[in-house]
């Protein structure tokens, strides 16, 4: 799990690259961050490339194997943080 300080550092870096911007709120305890147009474009490009890479990796699996893989990955994701 990321620590609050490390999240702030990450947001600072993304902000310097103009990928996100901080938004002010009436509640000073709340910190809102949103993607800029540049950030959205990068996310869109990155997800498209990732989806293509995953499709290429999974092309050898049958439909049933892909469904099984998805179920197993979801199970692993739900188990995150459990010991």
Image (cartoon, rainbow, N blue to C red):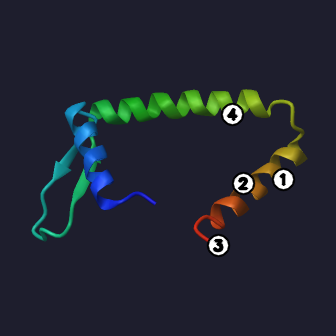
Q: What element carries label 3?
A: loop
Q: Mark 2 points at which residue?
A: 73
Query: Badge 4 local density, few (<14 within 10 Å), some, or many (20+)?
Result: few
Of the numbered discs in the image, which one, if any, rests on residue 83? 3
Q: In which quarter of the image is the C terminus?
A: bottom right
Q: Do the residues labelled 2 and 3 touch (CB within 8 Å)?
A: no
Q: Position of residue 55 (x, y in %)?
A: 72, 31
Quadrant in the picture for residue 40: top left
Give left or right: position of 9 versus 40: left
If you read the primary sequence from the N terminus, does the residue marked by circle 4 or circle 3 appear first? 4
What separation in Å lies between label 4 and label 1 (alpha carbons)? Answer: 15 Å
What separation in Å lies between label 2 and label 3 (alpha carbons)? Answer: 17 Å
Query: Which residue appears at 55% of the width and 30% of the height?
Result: 48
Q: Is mark 4 on a helix, strand or loop?
A: helix
Query: Which residue appears at 87% of the width and 43% of the height?
Result: 63
Query: Which residue appears at 68% of the width and 33% of the height?
Result: 54
Q: Position of residue 50 (x, y in %)?
A: 59, 32
Query: Which residue appears at 32% of the width and 52% of the height?
Result: 6
């Amino acid at each position: 799990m990321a620590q609050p300080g490390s999240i702030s550092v990450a947001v600072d870096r993304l902000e310097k690259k103009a990928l996100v911007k901080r938004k002010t709120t009436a509640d000073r305890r709340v910190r809102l961050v949103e993607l800029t147009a540049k950030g959205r474009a990068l996310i869109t490009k990155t997800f498209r490339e990732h989806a293509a890479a995953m499709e290429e990796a999974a092309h050898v699996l049958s439909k049933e194997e892909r469904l099984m893989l998805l179920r197993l990955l979801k199970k692993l994701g739900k188990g995150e943080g459990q010991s």
